[in-house]
Image: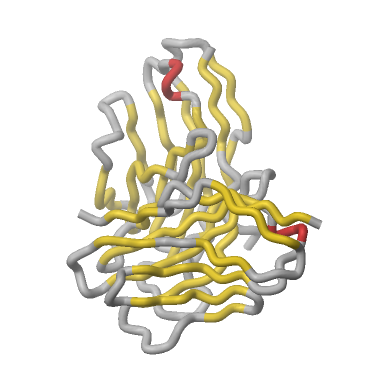
Amino acid sequence: DTGVSQNPRHKITKRGQNVTFRCDPISEHNRLYWYRQTLGQGPEFLTYFQNEAQLEKSRLLSDRFSAERPKGSFSTLEIQRTEQGDSAMYLCASSLAWFGQVGDGYTFGSGTRLTVV
Amino acid sequence: AQKITQTQPGMFVQEKEAVTLDCTYDTSDPSYGLFWYKQPSSGEMIFLIYQGSYDQQNATEGRYSLNFQKARKSANLVISASQLGDSAMYFCAMSVNNNDMRFGAGTRLTVKP
C-alpha cells in the first residue's frame, strides 16, 4: 500500500466552474476525512466517513460542497459554482476507527491545491 | 465544544538545543486523544506522536516527547537535540471520543545553525 493518494495535485479553475477531487485511502482504513487548509492556518475539518456512511459534516461545508464514498473505498469531494474563497489546499486523510496502537493516527495525502481565478 | 490553542505563531531554536511547543486544549469529554503533526514546506502532514487521555505516562517517540498535564489541559511537544530538518509548521490536534480530529493554528519552528 502506497499510502493515501489524492488527485489531482493541482487544479486551476475559473470562478463558477465545478471541480471534483478524488482520494484513495489506505485500503485497510475504514475512516476517511476531508480537510481544507489555507496558507498559514491549521487544517479545517470538512467531513468524514466511516465506510460508506458520512458521519459528520462541518458547518463550513456549504451546500455547494458534496462528498461521497460510494463503496467505502475511494471518496470524491465536489465543489459546485466555485468562488475565489474556495482557493485552498484540500487534504484527505484515512484511519482505522479505533486508536490505541502506538503510532496510530491519521495518514494524510499530499493534498489537492485548488486555485480559483 | 472542543478547542485546541497554540499560542506561539513562531519559535526559534539553536541547532542541537531542545525546544517546547505549547498546546492547550478544552473538552468536557473524558475520552480523547492528542496528536502532534509536522508539516514541512513541501506540504505533507507527518504524524509525530499520540497521547491518549487515559495514558498514565507521557508519550515518547525518538526525539519527540509529549508533556501531558491533564489537570492543566496542556499537551506540549518537546523536541530534543533540534536538527535543521526540524524546521517546519507543527500542529497540535485533538480527537474527542474517537471522532474526527480538530487542529490548532500551528507553530512555525525555525532551527538556526
Q: Is residue A73 above or below residue A84?
A: below
Residue at the location (44% across, 46% down)? Answer: B105
Q: Position of residue A48 (x, y in %)?
A: 34, 50
Q: To which quarter of the image does residue B100 belong?
A: bottom left
Q: To which quarter of the image does residue A59 belong?
A: top left
Q: Is residue B113 above or below residue A78?
A: below
Pick the front one: A37 or A46? A37
Q: Which color scheme is applied?
A: secondary structure
**Seen from this angle, which residue lies furthest bottom?**
B56
Q: Is residue B57 above or below residue B101?
A: below
Q: To which quarter of the image does residue B38 belong?
A: bottom right
**Seen from this angle, which residue lies furthest right?**
B113
Q: Position of residue A29 (x, y in %)?
A: 45, 64
Pick the front one: B108 or A83? B108
Residue at the location (76% across, 63% down)? Answer: B15
Pick the front one: B31 or A64? B31
Q: Position of residue B28 (x, y in %)?
A: 18, 66
Residue at the location (25% across, 49% down)? Answer: A56
Tell me the quadrant of the picture where the N terminus of chain A can be found: bottom right
Does residue B102 appear to the left or right of B36 in the view shown? left
Residue at the location (36% across, 62% down)? Answer: B24
Q: Position of residue B104 (x, y in %)?
A: 41, 51
